[in-house]
Image (tube, rainbow, N blue to C red):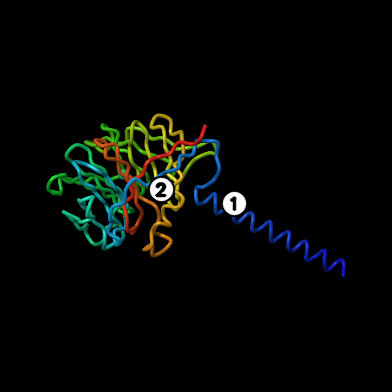
Amino acid sequence: MEALIGMRRTRMLMLLGATVLAVLLACYIAGDRPTGLPVYTYSIIATYPHDPEAFTQGLAFAGGYLYEGTGLTGQSSLRQVELETGQAIKDLQLPADLYGEGITILGDRVFQLTWKSHRGFVYDLESFALLGEFSYAGEGWGITHNGSALIMSDGSANLYFIDPETFSLIRQIEVHDDRGPVSRLNELEYIGGEIYANVWLSDRIARISPETGQVTAWIDLTGLSRQEQGVKDANDVLNGIAYDAVNGRLFVTGKRWQQIYQIELIPPRP
Ligand SMILES: [Ca+2]
């Protein structure tokens, strides 16, 4: 009998251990691993409608409008969107075999990546007329710029600085926090001298030093996805950061979310 109880106890302990390990692993995979870095939270300033069919892969703000790049094969597009109504003023469909990814606006040009086809596109911001095409090694995920160089992610912990005229690699950085490399970097936005990056499948945004790749702080957006009634599946994750530099407005959304959120970051308590 005692042997039986002992076996049950051992089995229970093993089960408990496996559960704890699974939870820790899930947290780690979700990017929610604890670090010693400052963690910002948020408050919602305003909400705006977002097309619930838009599988957001790129988000930018310029001249009073949102610009969005959407993904999924056969559904990929580049859009100019009216913030207040969520209506697309312009909607350019990508060729059906391409999977759209990040977008960024540098001057009067829009740059758009595709996922695995190594093809990037350059459009005129005003007309969406195709101005050119470029190629890159590896996958295309997110893209932003620092005013002189395009900055691209490919799902790894690396960010690539690319010349916007020749599309040659200027330099690359490995993004890391105090626990090591931070991979699955996705949609990007350059704000106030820092790179903000969505971490795929997580509710967190990393604030990254462009010089060193060091994560200087995390933004925890836990709870924002729960505002969304229309989330269809596990792929409909937080993705999309846009900054209105003129009015200092920060917008975030997710894939197939129903709303765009203007948020304010709340610094950690000292
Ligand atoms: Ca962006």
Secondary structure under the numbered disc 2 in the rendered image: loop
Q: Residue furthest top?
A: 211
Give the image quarter of residue 195.
top left
* Residue hosting label 2: 155
Q: Residue at x 69, y 61 (%)?
A: 15
Left or right: residue 91 versus residue 198 is left
Q: Residue at x 27, y 46 (%)?
A: 103
Q: Percent x, y for residue 66?
A: 23, 47
Left or right: residue 212 versus residue 83 is right
Q: Residue at x 50, y 37 (%)?
A: 177
Q: Percent x, y for residue 216?
A: 46, 33
Looking at the image, do the residues carrying marks 1 and 2 touch, with CB atoms under 8 Å apart?
no
* Residue hosting label 1: 24
Q: Residue at x 66, y 58 (%)?
A: 18
The answer to whether residue 140 is visible is no
Left or right: residue 163 versus residue 266 is left
Q: Percent x, y for residue 144?
A: 30, 40
Q: Percent x, y for residue 81?
A: 21, 52
Left or right: residue 62 versus residue 213 is left
Q: Residue 257, labelled with which disc? A: none
Which amino acid type is shown beneath numbered disc 1? Leu
Viewer-side residue, 147 vs 43: 43
Which amino acid type is shown beneath numbered disc 2? Gly
The total of numbered circles placed on residues is 2
- Which of pointers 1 and 2 indicates the residue nearer the eye? 1
Answer with the quadrant where ligand 1 appears in the image: top left
Q: Is residue 85 above or below residue 168?
A: below
Viewer-side residue, 58 vs 41: 41
